[in-house]
Image (spheres, rainbow, N blue to C red):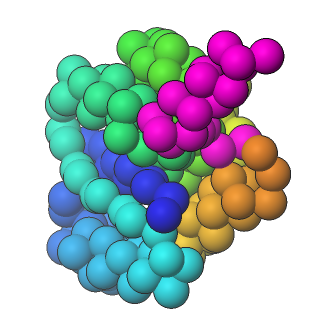
């Protein structure tokens, strides 16, 4: 079963309560439910978390290396500022998709730059909560249609053993 880590950055806990014209009416809980439902259909495991803290997001990305096959992240405002989140994604080497609810390229100039896009396999921007669902489908496809998925520890062990016998 594919295991996907979904991370939401700062202020996304406020979804649905304010700035509905930009970010929509759905709460983060409702967005997470839709992601979980699709994951069930795809027979994937998703673990979802939100943090207002850059350090906590970095820690979760680092920890994902041992437990997950890929990451979906909306880094929110840290998209435009965080070398630390970029470095963490690059360091773990897990395929990562960057999601934005709003179209960051139609907004203020400072939102046009993403520190994350250069280390992500793709970016979805401007499609609202649907962006997370497309990211999940895209990551699932990326991980299953090729040998891009990292081996489980059991597979790695048996490969190592097979190598040793040659
Ligand atoms: O469009 C996106 O998803 C963003 O990542 C959202 C960030 C923003 O800084 C990025 O430029 C684009 C802001 C998230 C704040 O979310 C709120 C939700 C409801 C009310 C207030 C803020």
Residue at image x 22%, y 75%? Answer: 29
Let me know if residue 116 appears in the view.
Answer: no
Residue 132 point in image, percent of width and height: 51, 66
User: Looking at the picture, does residue 109 appear above or below residue 15?
Assistant: above
Q: Quadrant of residue 127?
A: bottom right
Q: Quadrant of residue 22?
A: bottom left
Task: Please tell me how many numbered marks the rendered image carries.
Answer: 0
Residue at image x 25%, y 42%? Answer: 10
Q: Which residues are magenta?
A: 148-166
Residue at image x 43%, y 19%? Answer: 88
Let me know if residue 95 appears in the view.
Answer: yes
Split into 4 quadrants, where in the image is the C terminus?
top right
Q: Nearer the viewer, residue 79 or 134?
A: 134
Q: Residue furthest front?
A: 165
Q: Quadrant of residue 27?
A: bottom left
Q: Nearer the viewer, residue 88 or 10?
A: 88
Q: Is residue 152 magenta?
A: yes
Residue 2 point in image, percent of width and height: 51, 59
């Amino acid at each position: 079963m594919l295991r996907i880590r979904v991370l939401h950055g700062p202020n996304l806990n406020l979804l649905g309560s304010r700035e509905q014209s930009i970010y929509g009416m759905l709460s983060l809980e409702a967005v997470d439910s839709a992601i979980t439902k699709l994951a069930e259909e795809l027979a994937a495991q998703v673990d979802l978390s939100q943090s207002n803290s850059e350090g906590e997001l970095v820690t979760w990305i680092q920890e994902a290396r041992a437990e997950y096959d890929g990451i979906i992240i909306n880094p929110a405002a840290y998209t435009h500022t965080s070398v630390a989140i970029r470095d963490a994604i690059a360091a773990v080497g897990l395929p990562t998709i960057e999601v934005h609810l709003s179209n960051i390229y139609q907004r203020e100039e400072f939102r046009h730059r993403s520190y994350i896009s250069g280390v992500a396999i793709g970016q979805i921007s401007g499609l609202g909560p649907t962006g997370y669902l497309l990211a999940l489908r895209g990551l699932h496809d990326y991980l299953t249609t090729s040998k891009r998925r990292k081996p489980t520890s059991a597979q790695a062990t048996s490969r190592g053993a097979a190598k040793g016998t040659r």
